[in-house]
Amino acid sequence: MSQTRRTVATGALALGLSPGAALAAADLALVAQYGAPEAPVTVFETNAGGLGVFAHGQPARRLSLLAPGRYVVDGGGELVVTARGIRRDGVFLPRHDFGAEVQAGIRRAVRADPKALRARALAATPPKETGQFLPADLVDLATIDPTITFDIRYASRDNFMGLKLYERPAAWLQRPAAQALGRAAKVLAAQGYGLTIHDAYRPWFVTWMFWEATPPASRVFVADPAKGSRHNRGCAVDLTLHDLATGAVVQMPSRYDEMSTRSYADFAGGTARQRSLRQILRDAMVAQGFEIYPEEWWHFDYGDWRRYPIGTKTFTELAG
C-alpha cells in the first residue's frame, strides 16, 4: 500500500465508513471524482449520511450544506456545484469517470489490429522459472458451490480491451484455492450473499496482451508478463458479491476492471453502503487464506500462489 493511499484511508476512517442514513438524491449525485487523473478530488458519503471530500493524498473533510448546491468545507473553504463539475475555493474541477476514459483509449488502440496482437501474444515465450513447483491441479469452480455465479468478462467483449480473449466462459483455480473459495461462499451465504466470479486462471498469453495494450501510467492494474501473474498460476480470483434473494450484483466503489483510484482496495470514496459491501467480501476471503491485492478490490490471491508454475494452457485445452 502506498503512503498516499494510507493517508487518504486514514482521513476517511475518521469520518466513519459504516453504512448510515441515506443521502438525499441531490447529495448522492455528487458522489464522484473531479479534477485531474493524477490528483483527483473525491466527494464521498460519510457514515452519518452526509458528504465528505478529499484531495488525492490529503485528509478527508466534512461538507456542510450552506444553500442548495453550495457547501462549506470543514476546516475552511467552500464547494459549489456546477453543471459540469464543482468549484472548490473558486477553482473549477470537471467531473470525470477516469476508468471509462482510460478504457476508451485502450479500446481505440486495440481496435487497430486485434488479430495481430493476439498472434504476437501466442508467439511470445513465457519467462523461464527455476525451482520446485507443485503440479497444477486446476478445479472447475462451477463444481464448488451452488451459490457461486459467473460473469466471465474475458469470454465476451465486456472488458477493458473490448475483445473476446477466452474461448469459453469458465473459471479454474488450484484445488486448495478452490476449496478455500467454497468455504468463503458458505460464510457469505449465511449473510445473504453469493460470489460472482469474473476471472480466475488466466493463460499467460492473455497477460502478455494486457501488458502490451495498457498505457504505462495504468500498468499498476496489469501484471508484467516477464514475471507472470498470480492468475497465470491459478491462484488468483476476481470476484464480487450478488444478493442471494434477488440475484442482483451489488454496487461496489468502482466497476470491475476499472483503471482508476476508485479500484484501490482501501479507496475511501463511494457510498457507505458500497464500502461496507466491499468489506464483507474482503473479510470472507481473507478469513479463508486469500490475500488482498491493494490496487483492485475484486482481486484476491491465495496464499500458496508462489508454489505453482506459470500456466500456458488455453481454455480449450483445459476443457479437453
Image: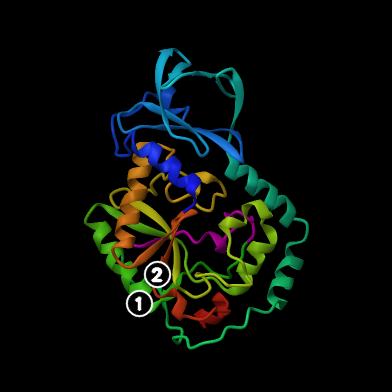
Would residue 102 appear left or right of 26 to someone viewing this image?
A: right
Q: Which residue is mark 2?
A: 302
Which residue type does callout 1 highlight? Answer: Pro
Which residue is disc 1 drawn over? 176
Q: Is residue 290 above or below residue 45?
A: below
Q: At label 2, which amino acid type do we have? A: Tyr
Front in this rendered view, residue 30 or 170: 30
Percent x, y of residue 223: 58, 64
* Residue at 42% from the left image edge and 83% from the top image edge: 137
Residue at disc 2, secondary structure: strand
Does residue 260 lie above or below 153 as drawn? above
Closer-to-camera residue (154/226):
226
* Residues shaded magenta: 147-163
Q: Secondary structure at mark 1?
A: helix
Mark 2 or mark 1, whichever is nearer to me:
2
- At 32% from the left edge and 48% from the top edge, which residue is drawn? 246
Q: Which label number is shown at residue 255? A: none
Q: How is the image coloured?
A: rainbow
Q: Whole-percent x and y of residue 77?
A: 49, 18
Tell which of 80 and 156 is nearer to you: 80
In the visual, does 179 lie left or right of 218? left
Is residue 155 found inside the magenta-colored segment of the image? yes
**As drawn, which residue projects farthest toward the top?**
67
Residue 284 drawn above or below residue 57: below
Camera-side residue of 9 and 274: 9
